């Protein structure tokens, strides 16, 4: 397999992350992407190196998409953390629950 064939296969299953979706949908989307990418990588035995400018451009696009996923997931993690802090504060202000 050439580097370009591998990059093209990975690009085909790595869309940009969806924007403004609930965290659970973002995680589900990433799980699907990660599974499809892993299946491709599991099938690879040997890859020729990246040699052309076109290959490098495709590689850079793949890296940009991966970075976009990392940013989206980090943002989601931060949002969940802030929600947890808010929930903890509400519980503290509400006092002990009766029951």
Image (cartoon, rainbow, N blue to C red):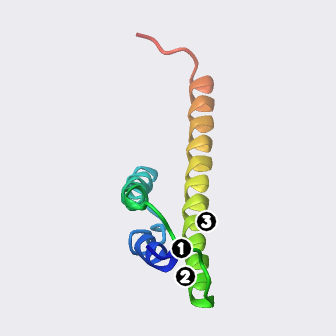
Disc 1 packing (10 Å; few <14; some 14–19; many ≥20):
few
- Which circle's residue, 2 or 3, is located before the other in the chain? 2
34 left or right of 69?
left
Q: Is residue 9 above or below residue 56?
A: above
Residue at the spot of label 3: 67
Percent coordinates x, y for residue 65 in the rendering? 54, 71
Residue at the spot of label 2: 58
Q: Nearer the viewer, mark 2 or mark 1?
A: 1
Q: Determine whether label 3 and label 1 are within 8 Å by CB.
A: no
Disc 3 is placed on an element classified as helix
Percent coordinates x, y for residue 31 in the rendering? 40, 52
Q: Residue at x 59, y 70 (%)?
A: 63
| 3D distance between C-alphas at marks 2 and 3 | 14 Å
Disc 3 packing (10 Å; few <14; some 14–19; many ≥20):
some
Q: Residue at x 45, y 11 (%)?
A: 98
Disc 1 is placed on an element classified as loop
């Amino acid at each position: 397999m050439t580097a370009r064939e591998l990059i093209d296969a990975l690009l085909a299953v790595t869309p940009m992350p969806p924007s403004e979706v609930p965290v659970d949908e973002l995680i589900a989307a990433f799980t699907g992407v990660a599974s499809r990418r892993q299946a491709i990588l599991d099938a690879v035995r040997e890859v020729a190196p990246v040699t052309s400018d076109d290959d490098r451009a495709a590689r850079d696009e793949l890296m940009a998409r991966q970075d976009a996923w990392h940013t989206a997931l980090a943002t989601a993690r931060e949002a969940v953390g802030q929600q947890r802090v808010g929930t903890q504060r509400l519980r503290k202000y509400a006092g002990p629950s009766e029951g």
